Amino acid sequence: MDKTYFGKIRTVFIDLDDTIWDFSANSKVAMRIVYEKYGLQDQCPYDDFIACYMPNNESLWTRYHHREITKEYLKRERFRRSFEQCGIVCNDPLQFDYDYLETIVTLKQVVDGAPELLAHLTKRGPVHVLSNGFANLQSRKLKSGGIDKYITKLILSDDIDVTKPDRRLFDYALEQVGGTPETTVMIGDNYDADILGANNAGWHTIFFNRKNVVLETNVADLTVTRLTDIIAWL
C-alpha cells in the first residue's frame, strides 16, 4: 500500500476515549482523587483496588459495546463488583460512580500526538468524533483536553441507543455528515468496536494499536502505534 491509498478520503471520523483523549491516564487520576475523598484507602490500598477495577471495567464495557448490558448496569456494577472483590464497604457505589465521572471530565490529558494529528486533519476537511461514551460527558472531555476546536460533529451511541460495532450507528453517522462509505475513514483504538464495526459498514479504517495488541487477523487498512504516524497517510 502506498501513500496515495487514502487519497479519496473526504470524511474523517475518530474515536474519543484512548484515541485522542487519554481516558486511561485521566481515569487513574480521577479514581485516586475520589477514592481518597471517600477514605477507602483505609480499607484497601489504592493500587490493589485499581488492579481489580480495570479488568472489571474493560469487561463490562465490552459487553456494553455489544448491547449485552445497559449503561445503568455498567455504571453500577463496575464499582459494586470491584468493591466486593477488594473487601471494601461503600454504601453507595452509584454516587461514587457519579463523583468519579464528574471528576474525570475536568482532566485534560490527551493522547500523545492528538493535537498534532487533529490540526493536520482539519486542514484537509472536517473531523468528526464517533463514540460510545456517555452523552453528558464526551463534549466536556473534548473541552477539558483543549481539542474541541478541531471537532465539527460529535456523534454518540446515546443519540440513537445503538453502540459501535453495530453497523446502524456507522450508517447513522454518515447520514449526519452527508458522507459515503467509500470516501470515509474511521480512526480508533478499539479493534472490535471501531475497526470491525467500520469495516462492516464499508468504511476505510486506521487502527491505532496503542497497546500493541496481538491480533490473529487484522482487517484494518492501516495500523499505527503512534497517532502522528497517520499524518503521512492522510
Image (cartoon, rainbow, N blue to C red):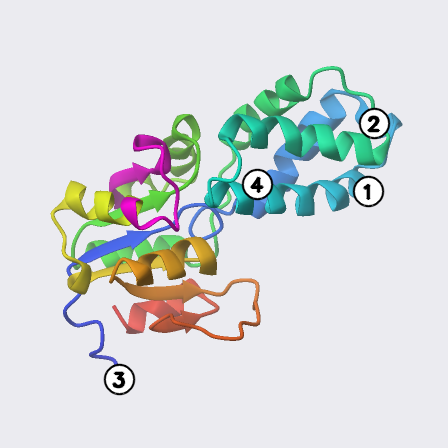
User: Given contact means CB atoms under 8 Å apart, are the residues at marks 4 and 1 in contact?
Assistant: no
Spatial CA span between label 2 and label 3: 54 Å
The first of marks 4 and 3 along the sequence is 3
Point out the frontmost of discs 2 and 1: 2
- Mark 2 belongs to which amino acid? Ile
Cα–Cα gap, marks 1 and 3: 47 Å
User: Looking at the image, is mark 2 or mark 4 earlier in the sequence?
Assistant: 4
Q: Given the image, on which type of amino acid does mark 3 rest?
A: Asp
Residue type of the residue flagged with mark 4? Asn
Q: How crowded is mark 2: few (under 14 residues within 10 Å), some or many (20 or more)?
A: some
Identify the mark at residue 2; answer none if there is no mark: 3
How many residues crowd mark 1 within 10 Å: few (<14), some (14–19), many (20+)?
A: few
**Mark closer to the observer (2, 3):** 2
Numbered mark located on residue 26 in the image: 4
- The range drawn in magenta is 150-168
Q: Residue 30 carries which label?
A: none
Label located before the other in sequence (2 or 3): 3
